[in-house]
Image: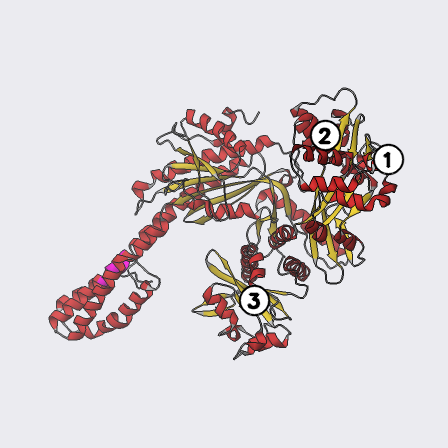
Amino acid sequence: MKLDQLKLNIDEIPFKKSLSFLPLINMLKEEKKNGFNLQAESILRVIEGNTSLLKADFDIKEVGKFEKEIHALMSYFFTPTQYKNDIGVASSPFDDHNFYFTPNYLKVYGDENIEIEMVEQKKQDKCYMTFTMLMYAYLMILPKFYKFNLNMDYLFMYRMTDKLNGLVRYYKIEFNEKCVDVTHNGTIPVASEDDIREMINDPMNLDFWLKTIPLNNFTFRGFLTFRYVDVTQIEVISSLKSQLLEKSSILNNNNFNDLEQNIRSLLSLPNLNLGVLALAMSQGNVDNPADFWHGFVDPNKYKCDAYQGTIYEEAAKSGAPVLINDLAKRPNLKPLEQELLNLGIRNISIIPLHYEGELVGMMELGSPKAFDISFTKLRIIKDVIPVFSIAVKRTSDELRNRIEATIKEECTAIHPSVEWRFQQAAGNLLNKKELGETVQMEEIVFKEVHPLYGAIDVRHSSVIRNQTIQDDLVEQLQLARKVLREAYADRKMPIYDQLIYKIDFFIDGIRKGLSSGDEMNVLNFIRHDVESLFPHFKENSDSLMLAIEEYHNNIDSELNIVYKRRKDFEDSLGIINDCATAYIEKEQEKAQEMFPHYFEKYRTDGVEHNIYIGQSISEQKPFDRIYLKNLRLWQLIVSAELARKTESLKGSLPIDLDVTGLILVHSQPLAIRFRQDEKKFDVDGAYNIRYEIVKKRIDKAEIKGTNERLTQPGKLAIIFSQEGEMVEYQRYLEYLVAKGYFEDDIEHLQLEDLQGVYGLRAIRVTVKKGVEPKEALVVAKELKLND
């Protein structure tokens, strides 16, 4: 319910209230009585004899007559240091009648160059003020009369903007109600803990609050004190993170200007300049792979090589921020560094941005004033540096993808479940063009869709692939060695013996482990140093000719290398992927009968699939959560059958490969947007990015407290973060265990934290072998999910 829809009378507060110093005075007397308290004694001495201050109802118009005494009373809440430094105020209960102010309060509210607004509530109308007072009233009533503490730390927050330099400060309001006596005349209204929790769950419905705990017979006497607590750092960092996770945070000039202004406010440097550029290290030099710049200098004037030997390359190679307090005093400036000075930048910091250990860009902080940016300022922004890295990486990838999309001859086919929306958008575009408007095709977004993600993956595929490369290289080296041994036996030339020694050196090194560049080095050696001798050998002995013939017979005619184990691996992987792809495509077509949903798959060292289901994807059929449950059960059954089918392939594969299964459960709906540059759908919005991050990292998840990988051959792992998800999948698995799809060994596991992903848990179950498969829809009907 909106505030302006409240039925309560906003012109009358339904309780009695009055200004009184008596609660504080009584508290001071009690403190003095119970122990030696110099402050209480000192304050009481100042107000001694002033009976007017002892009134239960003090007229606020009389405040000026007792300025000295009230200042003494307020020193209980505002020490001399707090009085000097804080923004504070005291007021009568639930009235906009302030009677005591700290100097900074008067300074801020008296400065016409400071704009003050309440965050998320710019329009402070009478209705909102009524809401404010009622909230404070209940904050005092609930703990005293119902033993229920209500914590609303950030109930109200103010934004103060300096109009002269644009810097913004954020303050939350801490109020102290110690000197308000709350009394009730008559029988206290009865309210259970459940009633109070229901009130809290519906905070805007104050009619319900007033009905549950009426305020008519409550009386509030005393005064309230308020302190403005600076939370700028927390709020600005939070705002920066939200901005950076938006797709256009860096490319869009307006958005980038907002980022720069937020950084200025965070560091309290109104003249600070922000720059961000995508860079990487290539063969030890600074490179710009994404052609994306938002930096200080003109990229058309200074190319990548201009950055070599500068503070930028120093930061890139060291991996740590470089801070130059005064660029004008730095000796031997490079042309690029001189250009920075010409642009008016004297104080500069270059901060390298890394994503998963890879340098993806640079962040520039510059000021025209020397020593403006200190190392303490850099510590303040350290928490947002990783988010800048993600934003740069994402932006760079998007730009690369756009470039690739322009040279693609084929576009991704549109899935039938969403074809209607593209037809609708195309129709709207044609209609507008007919009217002579210059328009682009509208964005295609499906909101409030539920994601399902699953994957089968070949276990240790990278290790096996490396091993097959090693085996092929060793075989080719041994075949070459045999040729050279025959040549040496026929004619004992030292060069042949030296080449044999080098081959043995390569074989020994490869067997110990394959390093980057080893394969190319070996092949270059064979082609240039060994195979080049073969024409010279043709007039030699028969045994040498046989060795050369054997060498050529084992070499792939197209690749000109030994390609046996690698081919076996790739063939085995291809068979598994073909089997999985064919099965999941066939079952997916049947699953569309449940409810139209978007489906996509892609091959890696296995097969992954994404499913999105929700009302926005269906043009006509109404969506019900039962369809989501049905699809989740279908995914479990399909995953079990995929495990069985891939296991049954083992005897026929050139290389036996183990396959693991994984499902990620995500309970919150999200939005997907069609990206024109890549002709594909992607999750939309900053919050939903976390879902994609989790997907990319869970395949390496380990069980908490062990080194054991969650995914194991013959088992299906279901990862989730919410308790309700576990309960739902526990129900499905118990049924499927009874039906013979899984063994009765359901494991509940906690997972080790991953980078940026915390608190994940999992259920793991063993797929039962040798069971006749059933169609997923039949099992769903047996579970009565279709009813």
In the visual, does 388 lie left or right of 171? left
Classified by dominant secondary structure, the portion drawn in magenta counts as helix
Q: Quadrant of residue 581?
A: top left
**Under tag 2, what secondary structure?**
helix
On screen, residue 126 above or below 476: above
Magenta range is: 471-477
**First reached walking from the N terminus: tag 1 or tag 3:** 1
Rendered view: 1 above or below 275 = above
Disc number for residue 601: none
Dots 1, 3 in contact, CB < 8 A? no
Q: Mark 3 or 2, which is nearer the eye?
A: 2
Dot 1 amino acid type: Asp
Residue at the location (13% across, 66% down)? 543
> Badge 2 local density, few (<14 within 10 Å), some, or many (20+)?
many
Asked which secondary structure carries label 1, the reply is loop
In the foreground, 66 or 762: 66
Residue matched to label 3: 349
- In the picture, the quarter occupied by the N terminus is top right
- Residue type at mark 3: give it: Ser
Q: Is residue 381 visible?
A: no
Q: Nearer the viewer, residue 647 or 295?
A: 295
Q: Are marks 2 and 1 in contact (CB under 8 Å)?
A: no
* Outermost top residue: 187
Q: Which residue is mark 1?
A: 11
Residue 151 visible (yes or no): yes
Q: Nearer the viewer, residue 101 or 240?
A: 101
Task: Give amino acid for label 2.
Answer: Ile
